[in-house]
Amino acid sequence: MQGFGQGPQMPTTTPKGFLAKIDPRGWSGRLPGGIMPGILPVPPRRLKPALRQRRLENIGLPMTLGRIGSLEVRLAQTAKDVKQAQKLRYRVFYEEMAAIPNTLSLVSRRDRDEYDTLCDHLLVIDHAAAPDVPGKPGGQVVGTYRLLRQEIAERHGGFYSASEYAVEPLITSHPGKNFLELGRSCVLPAYRNKRTVELLWHGIWTYVLHHKIDVMLGCASLEGTEPSRLALPLAFLHHHAPAEGEWRVKAVPERYISMNRIAREGVDVKRALQALPPLIKGYLRLGASFGDGAVIDHQFGTTDVLVVLPVEKINARYVEHFGAGAERHAA
């Protein structure tokens, strides 16, 4: 989710749908936002055993999850793959945007934290582009998402977004549901187009079906850390797309920022939609709702909102678009 996570967007061609309507300007889908206080960059030696475990857990998934022309979407298989994703995140979050790196990220030129060893990393690779490492085969990683399944999160202290939102009550109140957290999504500027995002979402949909995911969640971001300047989009989400009833999630008390900044009758819906980041508009079209309260992420210079999307609530036309069995872009 900001991609569902952090990233950019695209031109319009058929088929119609949210992917065909994404604006190429300003897509940033970092899901979830920021590095949790106290989490240190992960030593590279820990990536290899973690990746071996992830590969065992993903037995049955095809190596290639989808293709469009020279673009391929697949999961990271090696430590090199993960490092390429981290380098891409650094370029987008720290060099292009306004995130503030810690010392080790600054030295390594990689956005990294302990969650990188727990997550699967979805990659879009352009095989027609110069490789990330000169002289080496493999093309260039141009887009990424980070995926954290509930069963793994529960073994290692919980979901990353729990630093911003009280997600545990939501999870414990749905003991039969299988949750997936989406995050750290980004795309290189030249690839912020329909094809790249179609492949990212095709990869996520394939992963969701394979692991029998019931609910996706994660933080999406609005640029800026002054809620008064974001009053219109925040109020729109509060009044027109709140997660209600069993799906309601509230920001943790010490970080809670009210989204109810304009009365419902005072919200100009057209202007609010224009003010929303393309990724959040994409979530709305999918059928997502949003948590109670925003959270300021000073490290990334954003104001975050929580996206909640039960798979059963996904708009039917998007399920049809990618295929009930994720066959649309299957390799």
Image (tube, helix red, strand yellow):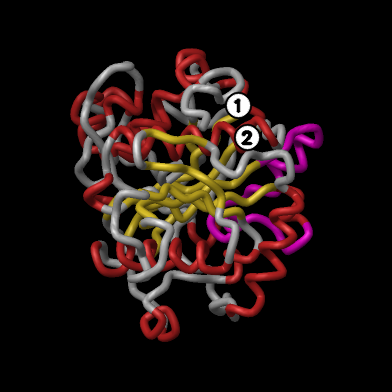
Q: Which corner quadrant of the image does residue 172 belong to?
A: top right
Q: Residue at x 59, y 81 (%)?
A: 43
Q: Nearer the viewer, mark 2 or mark 1?
A: 2
Residue picked out by circle 2:
208
Examine the structure image and report whether residue 165 is included in the region drawn in magenta.
yes
Q: Locate residue 272, reporting x and y percent.
A: 24, 32
Q: Position of residue 291 (x, y in %)?
A: 51, 40
Q: Which mark is residue 44?
A: none
Residue drawn at x 67%, y 48% as measured from the top left: 149
- Which amino acid type is marked by label 2? Val
Relative depth, front residue between 244 and 138: 138
Give the residue drawn at x 40%, y 28%: 239
Labels 2 & 1 near each other (Cβ < 8 A): yes
- Report x, y in % for residue 193: 27, 38
Which numbered disc flags the more N-terminal residue, 2 or 1? 2
Residue under pointer 1: 311
Q: CA distance from mark 2 to mark 1?
A: 9 Å
Give yes or no for residue 38 being in the magenta stretch: no
> In terms of image quadrants, where is residue 65?
top right
Label 1 Cα crowd, 10 Å radius (few <14 / some 14-19 / many 20+): many
Magenta stretch? 155-179
Query: Can residue 127 be seen at all in this image of the molecule?
Result: yes
Camera-side residue: 44 or 284?
44
Residue 300 in the image: above or below residue 231 = below
Where disc 1 sits, the SS reads helix
For badge 1, the amino acid type reads Val
